[in-house]
Amino acid sequence: MTPRLVALSDLHVAYPDNRRLIAELRPGAEGDWLLLAGDVGELFADVEWALRTLSGRFDTVIWTPGNHELWTHPDDPVQARGAVRYQRLVELCQSLGIVTPEDPYRVWDGPEGPVTIAPLFILYDYSFRPDGALNKEQGLAVAYETGIVCSDEVLLHPDSYPSREAWCQARIALTERRLTERDPALPVIFVNHYPLIREPTNVLRYPEFAQWCGTTRTRDWHVRYNATTVVYGHLHIPRVTWQDGVRFVEASVGYPREWSARPPRPGVPAPGLPRQILPVPAAEARAAEVQARAVRAAAGGQP
C-alpha cells in the first residue's frame, strides 16, 4: 500500500479505553508517518509509554506538546515545571527518534509531496477573549463567573517565564525565525496543539474556553507561510474546515465519554484511528477545489 501521512491528537492515555485504542493502533501501510498534535497524556510515565509504543510502529513520528503534557500534576513523580518539563519531554522524544519542535523540520517526500512538516510549540496569550472583554483580566473574570476555567490555571506553570503569555510570545518569536529559514519553495503542513486561528473555536459549547485556545498573533500564518494544511487538536471536535483555501484538520481522540457517544460520520475515522492528511482523501480534495474557486473569485479571478 502507498505510505500515508496521518495525524492524531488528544490521546489522553490515562483513560483505560483510550490506552487500549493506542495499544491496538497499527500503521495502515509500511512507511506511514504519524503526526501527534499534543495531549498524549498528563503523567510523564503515560506520555513515555504512548510515545515509545507509537515510535516503534510508525516509520516517523512527529510530536508537539499539548497543555496536558506540560501540566505538573501533584500525582506525577516527575515534578519538573514549565520550560524544564518541556525540555524533558523533548529529550524523551529525541531518545526515541521522534521529531519535536526543537528539531530540523522534516520533508515528506511521499505521495503529494514534497512538503515541509513544521511541528509548532505555540501556547496562548488570552487574546481569544470573550465578547466584551477588553483584556486578559476581564476575560478571566468572565470565565470565573461562569465556572468555565481551564485547569492550566493551576497545573501549567510557565517557569522560568513570568507568565504563560510571555512564554507564548517567546515561542512565537523563535518559531517565526525558524519558519523564515525553511525552504521557501516548499509548502508547509503545520502541526500545533492549538488552532492557529480563532474560527475553529466558534463552535465551542462554552465560548469562554477559547481564551486558552491560541493567539491572534498566528492568525495569518497559514497564508504567510504557504500552508496546505494545519493539524491541531485541543478542542475535542474532530472535523475538517477551510480558511483562505487552507485545510484545518482537528484530529482529536478526546475523552471516552466524548468519542463513545459520537455516531459514525462519513469521512470521519473510527475512534482511535488517525486522520489521513496525505494523500488528501478524495472528498477533501473535492472540497479543496471548491475552496480554491471561492478564493480566486473573492480575489477577482475567474471561478
Image (tube, helix red, strand yellow):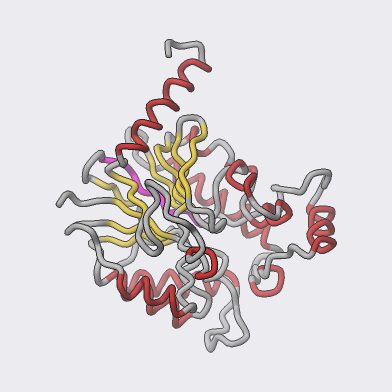
Residue 170: image location, x then y, percent: 60, 55
Above or below: residue 193 compared with residue 130: below
Which residue occupies 54% across, 58% down? 236
Q: Is residue 115 magenta?
A: yes
Residue 205: image location, x then y, percent: 67, 54
Q: Is residue 40 magenta?
A: no
The answer, for residue 159, to whether it is visible in the render is no
Q: Tell me which segment is drawn in magenta.
A: 113-121
The answer, for residue 271, to whether it is visible in the render is yes
Residue 34: image location, x then y, percent: 32, 59
Q: Is residue 15 left or right of residue 150?
A: left
Which residue occupies 58% across, 45% down? 200
Above or below: residue 34 compared with residue 184: below
| Residue placed most toward the observer, 19 or 6 | 19
Displayed quadrant of residue 287: top left
Q: Residue placed farthest to the front in the image?
A: 263
| Residue placed most toward the observer, 106 or 140 | 140
